[in-house]
Image (tube, grey):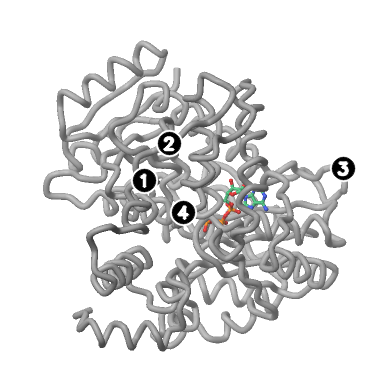
C-alpha cells in the first residue's frame, strides 16, 4: 500500500484529506509543522509527500529542499492558494512534481496522487542499469515523443536539433522551466548515432551533494556506510550513449571539478576503487539559470562552462511559440484522453480564448497539467471554462484592466514579471517581450526599488 505524508498546518483540512486518501487505499500520515514532518519523513519510508507551501515559522520552499535532500527521488505535490502560482512554479523548479491550487476537488487530488506515484515507478525504470553495451540493451527511457510545432521559434529549434544531432558536440540547452529542455535533449539523442545506446537523464538539482560523486561515478561495496554492493554510476550507465544533466547550475563546486575531469579524460573511477574505467559519453546539459552570470559570480567554473557549451540551444517559452499553442493543446488533450480513458473532443471558444490570454509561466508543462486536470473534470464532450483553475482568470483580469491607469498597469506587470523570474532582469525582459534596456529604463521611470 503506497505511503503518503501530508504536511498541512490546518489540522481539520489535513485530517479530512487523510480520511479521503485512506478510503482510496493509501496509508496516510500527517504533520502539522515542518519540524515534525522532517522527523517523520526521515523515520518512515514514504512513497510521496503532499505539502502546503505556507507553514507557520517555516518557508515551504525550504521544506521542499530539505525533503529532497533526504530523498531526492520522492515525488512532492505542493498545495497553494490560487493566487500563489509563481510560488508554485518556483516550487516546481526546486523539484516539486506538481502543484494543486486550493480549493480543489477530491477527484483532482486523486488524479495527481496517482500521477505522482506512476511517475515514481517510471523514474525507477528510468534509472535502471544497462546490462551491457549492446544495442538490444537499450533502456526505454523515452521522455514522451514531442511534436515539432509550426512557429518560427519551433522551426529554428528543430533546425538546430537536426544540425547538432549527428555531431558529438556538447550541447547546453537553456530555457525557462517546462519549455521542453529534456524533450529536446532526447530528440538530439534519438536522431544521433548514439540512439541505440542509453539516454540517461539526471536532475542535478535533486542529487544531495554528499552522494553526488557516487551517483555520477558509482561505488564499490564497502567504500562508505551504506555501500552494500557495487553500483555503477550515471557515466557508466550512459556509456556509448548520452548523459543528460538537467539543472547543471546546481552542481557543487567540487562536483563541477569531478565532472570536468571526467569529460576531459573520458575516464572515471568508482568511489572506493583505483581502477580507471574508460567511458564514451556525449554530454547534453540544461539550465534555466543564467550560467554566464554564475561564472561571473564565481559559483560556476568557467572551464566547465566552455567544455559543456560547444553549442547552445534555447528552448522557446510558450509565449514565444504562441502559434503552436493549439497544436500542443490538442496533443496534450489526446494524451490526457488516453491516460484517463476519456473521450473529450476539444475546447470551447471561451476556453481557447482564456488559453490565449494567459501567459503560461510554467510553459508546456503547465499547459499539459491544466489540460489533464480539465479532461478529468469534464463530463461532456468539450472543455468549458468552468473546469479551468482560477489562476488562469486571475491573470486574465490583469491583462485587461478596466480601472487601471496604463502606467499602474505597466508597473504592475513589471513587478509581476520580476517576481516570477526571481528578479532576473534578462528573463523578466523576455517575459515582458521588451529589451533589457527598456526594462531598466522602466525600472528607473517607475522608481522601482529592487
Ligand atoms: N515538443 C513537445 N511535444 C510534446 N510535449 C512536450 C514537448 N516538449 C515538452 N513537452 C512536455 O512538456 C513537459 C515539460 O518538458 P520537459 O521536462 O522537457 O521541460 P524542461 O524544460 O526540461 O523542464 P525543467 O526546466 O522543469 O526541467 C513534459 O511533460 C514534456 O513531455
- Secondary structure of the residue carrying tag 4 is helix
Mark 1: give few (<14), some (14-19) or many (20+) Cα within 10 Å.
some
Element class at badge 3: helix
Badge 2 is on which residue?
388
Front of the two marks 3 and 4: 4
Asked whether the viewer can see residue 278, the reply is no
Residue at 49 percent across and 40 percent down: it is 350
Gap between marks 2 and 1 measured at Cα: 9 Å
- Compute the Cα span from label 1 to label 3: 49 Å
Mark 1 near mark 4, Cβ–Cβ under 8 Å? no
Q: Is mark 3 within 8 Å of ligand 1?
A: no
Q: Residue 353, percent across and down?
A: 50, 47
Q: Nearer the viewer, residue 131 or 49?
A: 49
**How many angstroms separate mark 3 from mark 2 (CA)?**
44 Å
**Mark 1 CB within 8 Å of ligand 1:** no
Q: What residue is pinned by disc 3?
A: 136
* Relative image position of residue 21 (x, y in whole percent): 35, 18
Q: Is residue 450 left or right of residue 128?
A: left
User: Label for residue 133?
Assistant: none
Q: Which residue of the protein is positioned furthest toward the top in this rendering?
A: 23
Q: What residue sits right under mark 1 in the picture?
A: 393
**Sequence order check: which comes first, mark 1 or mark 4?**
4
- Give coordinates of residue 228: x percent, y percent: 53, 42
Which residue sits at x=54%, y=29%? 375
Q: Is residue 410 above or below residue 232?
A: below
Q: Residue at x 78, y 69 (%)?
A: 159
Cβ atoms at labels 2 and 1 below 8 Å apart: yes
**Which of the two labelled residues, at mark 3 and mark 2, occupies the earlier sequence position?**
3
Amino acid at each position: 500500500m503506497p505511503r503518503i505524508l501530508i504536511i498541512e498546518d490546518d489540522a481539520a483540512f489535513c485530517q479530512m484529506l487523510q480520511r479521503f486518501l485512506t478510503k482510496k487505499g493509501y496509508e496516510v500520515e500527517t504533520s502539522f509543522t515542518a519540524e515534525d514532518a522532517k522527523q517523520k519523513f526521515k523515520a518512515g519510508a514514504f512513497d510521496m509527500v503532499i505539502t502546503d507551501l505556507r507553514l507557520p515559522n517555516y518557508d515551504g520552499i525550504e521544506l521542499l529542499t530539505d525533503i529532497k535532500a533526504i530523498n531526492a527521488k520522492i515525488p512532492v505535490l505542493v498545495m497553494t492558494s490560487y493566487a500563489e502560482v509563481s510560488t508554485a512554479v518556483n516550487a516546481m523548479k526546486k523539484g516539486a512534481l506538481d502543484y494543486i491550487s486550493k480549493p480543489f476537488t477530491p477527484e483532482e487530488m486523486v488524479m495527481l496522487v496517482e500521477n505522482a506515484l506512476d511517475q515514481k515507478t517510471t523514474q525507477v525504470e528510468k534509472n535502471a542499469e544497462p546490462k551491457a553495451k549492446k544495442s538490444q540493451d537499450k533502456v526505454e527511457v523515452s521522455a514522451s515523443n514531442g511534436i515539432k510545432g509550426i512557429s518560427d521559434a519551433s522551426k529554428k529549434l528543430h533546425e538546430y536539433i537536426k544540425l547538432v544531432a549527428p555531431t558529438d558536440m556538447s550541447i547546453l540547452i537553456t530555457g525557462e522551466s517546462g519549455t521542453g529542455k529534456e524533450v529536446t535533449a532526447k530528440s538530439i539523442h534519438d536522431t544521433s548515432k548514439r540512439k541505440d545506446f542509453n539516454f540517461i537523464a539526471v536532475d542535478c538539482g535533486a542529487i544531495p551533494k554528499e552522494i553526488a560523486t557516487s551517483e555520477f561515478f558509482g561505488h564499490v561495496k564497502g567504500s562508505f556506510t551504506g555501500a552494500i554492493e557495487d553500483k555503477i554510476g550515471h557515466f557508466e550507465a550512459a556509456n556509448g550513449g548520452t548523459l543528460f544533466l538537467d539543472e547543471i547550475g546546481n552542481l557543487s563546486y567540487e562536483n563541477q571539478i569531478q565532472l570536468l575531469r571526467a569529460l576531459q579524460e573520458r575516464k572515471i573511477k568508482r568511489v572506493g576503487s583505483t581502477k580507471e574505467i574508460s567511458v564514451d559519453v556525449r554530454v547534453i546539459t540544461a539550465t534555466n539559470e543564467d550560467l554566464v552570470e554564475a561564472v561571473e559570480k564565481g559559483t560556476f567554473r568557467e572551464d566547465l562552462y566552455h567544455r559543456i557549451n560547444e553549442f547552445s540551444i534555447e528552448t522557446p517559452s510558450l509565449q514565444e511559440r504562441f502559434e503552436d499553442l493549439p497544436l500542443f493543446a490538442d496533443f496534450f488533450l489526446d494524451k490526457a484522453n488516453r491516460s484517463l480513458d476519456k473521450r473529450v473532443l476539444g475546447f470551447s471558444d471561451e476556453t481557447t480564448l482564456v488559453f490565449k490570454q494567459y501567459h503560461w509561466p510554467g510553459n508546456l508543462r503547465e499547459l499539459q497539467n491544466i489540460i489533464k486536470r480539465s479532461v478529468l473534470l469534464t463530463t461532456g464532450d468539450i472543455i468549458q471554462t468552468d473546469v479551468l483553475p482560477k489562476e488562469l482568470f486571475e491573470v486574465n483580469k490583469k491583462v485587461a484592466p478596466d480601472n487601471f491607469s496604463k502606467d499602474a498597469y505597466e508597473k504592475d506587470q513589471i513587478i509581476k514579471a520580476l517576481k516570477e523570474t526571481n528578479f532576473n532582469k534578462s528573463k523578466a525582459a523576455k517575459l515582458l517581450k521588451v529589451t533589457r534596456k527598456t526594462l531598466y529604463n522602466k525600472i528607473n521611470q517607475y522608481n522601482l526599488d529592487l
